[in-house]
Each structure stands twice: as structure tokens, then as C-alpha cells.
Amino acid sequence: MTLKFPIYMDNHATTPVDPRVLDAMLPFFTQDFGNAASRTHAYGWHAEAAVDGARDTLARLINAESGKEIVFTSGATESDNLALKGVAEYYGAKGNHIVTTTIEHKAVLDSAKRLEKQGFTVTHVSAGPDGIVDPDDIKKALTDKTILVSVMLANNEVGTIQPIAEIGKLTRERGALFHVDAVQGIGKTPFDVRAMNVDLASLTAHKIYGPKGVGALYVRRSKPRVRLMAQMDGGGHERGNRSGTLNVPGIVGFAKAAEIMINEGAAEAVKLRALRDRLWKKLTSELDSVVLNGHAEQLLPGNLNLSFAFVEGEGLMMAIKDVAVSSGSACTSASLEPSYVLRSMGLDEDMAHSSIRFGLGRFNTEEEVDYVAELVVSKVRRLRDMSPLWEMHQEGIDIKSIEWVAH
Amino acid sequence: MAYSEKVIEHYENPRNVGAFDKNDPSVGTGLVGAPACGDVMRLQIRVNDAGVIEDAKFKTFGCGSAIASSSIATEWIKGKSLDEAATVRNSQIAEELNLPPVKIHCSVLAEDAIKSAIEDYRKKRAAREVLDKE
């Protein structure tokens, strides 16, 4: 088999649409193009039926009680915004405290920041050095004023899977609502909103081989019934929770992607873990000073976040431009700050600068893994030969013992 | 972010990678930057008795722009007198490599590395002259 370049290993950023998903979507652009809110003709009825079928499929994916608990949105950023701001605005009279973690996605952190400006108090619980949040730390953060706790299912950088069931137990006991940004984890690691006592969950299609631009917020309807203040005003769609004409082809594609995950997710996880382990073994059998960021077992099957010590991440990505990956290096962001997730885990900044995230997905192959491993090994060696830090390391000098002048 | 052709060219074919013995009296060494900031440059010059930089070497931990900036810096100062080399400005490097604003600090680091290497050489030379007189 010939390899297609660049090889895509950035499946935490987004995934290609599965051809089966595209096939399911296509009729909804041209033939079944009706507005799901049109109640007066067959075009509308057909679209509405397709959307309601999709709600039921998504409900099954997360074991929700009913499709009525699914609110469609434009994606997970909107879902996170709606969950935090919608809950805060509705329950603000009951309490003004929100608990979240330092490793959440910016859509959660920045929504929380805005709420702080509006008078809410937000506690940010740190993850441990292994990238996992300790439920005890969440417990300590809870107060009588806590109305909402927001913790992600799996981290987008280091892939660590958070103890959602344990946290759900705590929030249920204390009567705080529990929101989970489940974007990276759904279909890839068990997620059951009923068993885990989750009250709100953000989902998106494009991380599970569905289209971009469509997401959902699970909003529990019983025990407790969760209420939201809508953030988008208009025609009162989605039971008043989110106005706007539904993206019917996107929603149909989202459901097809979810259905494939329901049927194949577990087997796919086994395949991805094998590919990930293959990549890890090949890299570490050839290279010294490669550090795994995160937890060795409690992580997404396709995630491998590594720091190649003494080599800068962006420099390495430039050397492996035939491979699409991402880095926690500052140089890849406009802010020049290295990854806040890695730093909050206590990683030294130089190691954050040296990090590369490999995100394996459905369409990666063993040949690709072998090619990438060989390429990375040769380029890391080349860059280490050019690195003054590697030379010092070889000479036995501890680079931490040097007084560097930060610029 | 797209790199300029010149950055890619220097990154893929860096000039003057390597090291001189830092204890050699004719060698000046500049080590600038910090691992925590994501770039460290070590630039070395070998200076003859006439005060001319005969050769230069570098090793850099950093992104493509940092490596390209070091590469071009070593190329420019070779054959120059110490005073001439000290006039190389980061803006010239940034212009030559077409660095975007977010990468200007790479060229600043290269200028600092040149100055630091020259200073190191001059210090060593001054110390030796004191010894010679004694």
C-alpha cells in the first residue's frame, strides 16, 4: 500500500468524515432539504423525523433516558457556553459558585471567566502530574453555594480519562449540577450519563468522524430536571433552549457517526491501542529521554503525548512536515506560552516546549505508524546533534543547574 | 504558520553546525536564551591574531526560525573583524529571513549570541594579556 502524505495523526483536532456518514448526509442537502420546524408539509415532517431519529441515536450513545434530552448546537464550544452560562443564569439565585479544572478546554475556561466578571466565583481544581483530577480535590472545592461542576471526560492534549463516575456521585450528593465536556471521549471510552450521574454533556460530531459545525448538549430531564437560560434568542427551537434552524444534514451525519461508534467503538479502541503501543515501542526503543505526558493507562486509545527532551517541538514538527501532528510548544501558539494543560500538570516549561501530540484515528494504519516512527527517530537524532542542551546532557551537565537568562 | 523559503532552506541545510573547544584561547562562546522559553542558542567564533573571525559554529535548541537565524548569523560574521561582526542587527536577520512578528525574538537572540561570543573572546584575551605581562 502506498502512503498518502501528509500522514494525518492529529485526530484530537478533528477527524475526516467517514464515507458512510457522508452517504447518510447527502440526500438531506438536495432531496430531503426541508426545515425541521416546518409543520405544514411533508418536507418539514421528513426532516423532523430524521432529526428525532438522530436524537434517539445520540441518546443511546451516552445512555440518556430520552432523545428529548438532546439539544442540537453548532458544536461543542456552543454546547459548553450554553451549559455554563445557561445554568449560571438560571440558577444564579440559588448559588454563585462554580467548580472546574485547570485542564478544561478554553470553551469552558473562558465561559467561566466571563461568569466571574458577572459576579460568580470559580474554583479551578488542578490535575495531578499524571493529568488526572482527584475527586477528593473536587469534593474539597464544593460549598453550599456550588451550583455547577464542570469536568471533561477526556483531556484533548494528554488524553487522560477523568473519574467522571466518582465526581458524579459527589455532585449528586451535594445537589450541584454536573456538566461534562465529553467531546474527546465519546465512543472511545465508556460514558453513561445515567450511571455516572451526569446532568449536562457537551458532544460534537467532528471528533467522531462526523461533519464539522454540529454538536449537542445533553440536558437531563428528570432527577433532577435541568433548566437552562437560552443564550440564543429566536424561534424557540430545541424546546426553547437553542433557537436557530436545525442543521439537518449535519445532525443526520452526527447520528450516523454515533451509530458507527455504538457498533464499532469498542473494537476500534482495541485497534488504536495496538497502534499507539506500536508507535510508543518503536520510538522509545530507538531514542533516549522520551517522556510520556499524562497517564500510561487511563487515557484515550489513540493518544500519545510525548516530550522529546532537548528538542523543541515546533522545530521537530517542521522536520516531520510529512506528518500532521500538534505540539504544546509555545511557538505553535500566537501567545508564545507553552500549553497551559502541560504546565498545570507541573511539567517543566522546557519539556512542554518539547512535546508532540500524536492522535491516532480510524484511518491510520500500521504502515503509517512504522513510517512515522522511523521519521521521528531520525529527525530527533538530527535535531539533538544540533542542540546545545543535548550536548550538555551528554557531558553530564544538568541543564537545570545553569542560570539561564530568560528573555 | 507558513515559513519563508529562506527559513526552510537554512533549516534544512544549516550552515556551520558544530562546536569548538570553549577552552581554546582563540575561541569565544556565546550561550543565550533559556530552555523554559523554548530557545537556546550557542554561537562560537574562532578569532585570529588580526582580530578577524576565521570560523563560526552554532548549536541551537529551538524552532525552525531560531535555527535559521543562528545559521545565517554564523554565515554573516565569518571573515569579519570583531567590530564589524558586532554591527550585525537583528532587524537585518529578520528581514533576510522574512520572519513574521511572532518570530522576531529569534533574530534578537541571534544578535545577542554574536555579541555574547565577542564579549567572551575579548574577556579571555584581556585576561591572557594580563597574564602575559606578569
Image (tube, rainbow, N blue to C red):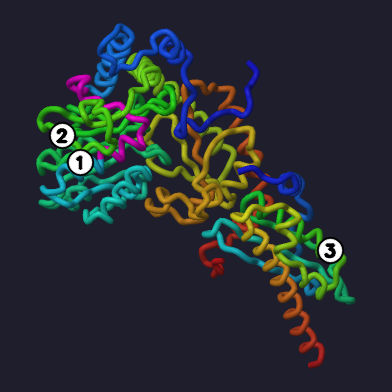
The chain holding disc 3 is: B
Quarter holding the C terminus of chain A is bottom right
Kind of residue at badge 2: Val
Q: Is residue A360 above or below residue B91?
A: above
Mark 1 = which residue? A87
Of pointers 1 and 2, the one earlier in the residue sequence: 1
Gap in Å between the C-alphas at discs 2 and 3?
71 Å
Q: Which residue is mark 2?
A: A226
- Label 2 resides on the chain identified as A
The x, y position of residue B106, in whole percent, is 64, 58
The residue stretch that appears in magenta: A64-83
What is the x, y in percent for residue A141?
Answer: 19, 52
Q: Amino acid at mark 1?
A: Val
Q: Secondary structure under badge 2?
A: loop
Which amino acid type is shown beneath numbered disc 3?
Lys
Determine which quarter of the picture holds residue A184. top left
x and y percent of residue A55 in the render? 27, 19
Marks 1,2: beta carbons within 8 A: yes
